[in-house]
């Protein structure tokens, strides 16, 4: 029996889950094989970690903290709902004011230019573009 | 007070019933979360989340299964989600680090033994090796194995918690043990533990 087939059974050997016949074969192999015994010891120490780690300590303030979180949640929720309702209303108001303001400005602008021919306003824009901004600032100074 | 009375109390918003339930079951939930996340503080935060969920969704508990079965289910789901989110974060973090020219942390962990071959392996390192091996198990194998090892639950209850057949639980735990053994054998061969 070679080590490869034995080491595949060792975790089940440790947990007493091998059929009797197989268990005896593994036992006999272990009696004369140092390498498999070494691996068995390693497995055993790794499996021991499960029992060592069992029942990690819970902090003494566990319920106090939990209770505070519960309260926070209950207080937070109604406020949250209120915010959820009011927020879109405020956004809508801002949007409507913005659109109205924009329309007002737009209509003022078109009123002031209605008497002028369209080409005139284009020319004005071109003039403005042709004039470098630096010279415009220098003139002011 | 029995389980159903406790739940009825919680359904009516009674804090005393809730406190009793928390005191009775917090170690069970903590154990389960810790088995999956391997960190005491994270496990305690998750345990808190589990009980908040219990308080919030108590009306969904119909009493068809044991209360503990329900708690195990919430605890495993939350812990697995936590791990998944962490992995996602880790993925983006490693991209960030790669761009920033930082060192890759996961490489550091797997190579730390190679950096110090003469040092004796500490208990902490052994634990980390075991945790890494558990984390590499597929999720279902991991959950079945942890419920069996940390909580010593019988296969029948694990089947109820995971909503699978008894035969599936047997097969999952068998494969989990084989996988763990293989991983630990690889480590043994490479002398990393
Ligand atoms: Zn051997």
Image: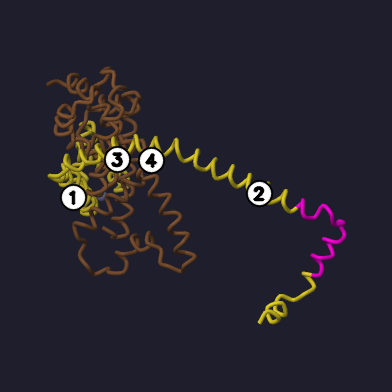
Chain colours: A yellow, B brown
Q: Position of residue B3 (x, y in %)?
A: 18, 22
Where are the magenta residues, as a range? A110-127
Q: Is mark 3 within 8 Å of ligand 1?
A: no
Cα–Cα gap, marks 1 and 2 = 76 Å
- Percent of width and height locating residue A53: 18, 46
Residue B110 place in picture, x, y as percent: 34, 60
Q: Main secondary structure of the magenta part?
A: helix
User: Disc 4 versus disc 1: distance between alpha carbons?
Assistant: 23 Å
Image quarter hosting the C terminus of chain B? bottom left
Q: Is residue A13 visible?
A: no
Pointer 3 and pointer 1 on the same chain: no
Q: Secondary structure at mark 4?
A: loop
Tag in front: 2 or 3: 2
* Residue A39 image position (x, y, % from top left): 24, 51
Q: Which residue is mark 2?
A: A102
Front tag of 4 and 1: 4
The answer, for residue A85, to whether it is visible in the render is yes
The mark closer to the camera, 2 or 4, is 2
The response on whether ligand 1 sits within 8 Å of label 2 is: no
Decide: marks 3, 4 in contact (CB < 8 A)? no
**Relative side of B94 to B74, left or right:** right
| A36 shown above or below A120 | above
Other-residue count near label 2 (Cα within 10 Å), few / some / many at <14 / 14–19 / ≥20: few
Residue B138 bears which disc, if any?
4
Instruction: Looking at the image, tell me whether mark 3 or mark 4 is earlier in sequence order.
Output: 4
Residue A108 is left or right of residue B130, and the answer is right
**Residue A45 bears which disc, if any?**
1
């Amino acid at each position: 029996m070679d080590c490869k087939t034995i080491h595949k059974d060792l975790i089940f050997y440790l947990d007493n889950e091998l059929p009797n016949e197989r268990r005896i074969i593994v036992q006999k192999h272990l009696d004369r094989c140092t390498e498999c015994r070494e691996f068995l010891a390693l497995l055993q120490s790794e499996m021991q970690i499960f029992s060592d780690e069992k029942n990690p300590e819970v902090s003494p303030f566990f319920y106090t903290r939990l209770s505070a979180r519960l309260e926070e949640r209950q207080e937070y929720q109604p406020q949250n709902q209120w915010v959820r309702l009011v927020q879109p209303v405020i956004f809508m108001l801002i949007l409507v004011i913005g659109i109205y303001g924009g329309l007002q400005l737009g209509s003022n602008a078109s009123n002031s230019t209605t008497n002028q021919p369209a080409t005139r306003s284009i020319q004005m824009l071109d003039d403005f573009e042709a004039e470098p901004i630096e010279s415009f600032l220098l003139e002011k100074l | 007070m029995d389980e159903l009375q406790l739940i009825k109390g919680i359904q009516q918003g009674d804090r005393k019933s809730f406190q009793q339930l928390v005191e009775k079951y917090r170690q069970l939930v903590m154990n389960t979360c810790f088995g999956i996340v391997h960190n005491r503080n994270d496990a305690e935060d998750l345990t808190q989340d589990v009980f908040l969920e219990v308080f919030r969704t108590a009306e969904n508990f119909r009493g068809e299964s044991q209360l503990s079965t329900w708690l195990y289910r919430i605890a495993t789901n939350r812990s697995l989600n936590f791990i998944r989110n962490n992995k996602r974060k880790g993925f983006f973090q490693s991209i960030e680090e790669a761009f920033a020219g930082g060192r890759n942390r996961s490489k550091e962990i797997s190579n730390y033994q190679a950096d110090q071959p003469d040092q004796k392996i500490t208990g902490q390192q052994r634990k980390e090796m075991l945790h890494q091996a558990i984390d590499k198990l597929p999720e279902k194998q991991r959950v079945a194995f942890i419920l069996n090892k940390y909580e010593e639950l019988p296969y029948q209850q694990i089947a109820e918690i995971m909503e699978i057949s008894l035969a599936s639980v047997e097969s999952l735990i068998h494969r989990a043990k084989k996988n763990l053994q293989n991983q630990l054998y690889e480590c043994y061969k490479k002398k990393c533990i």
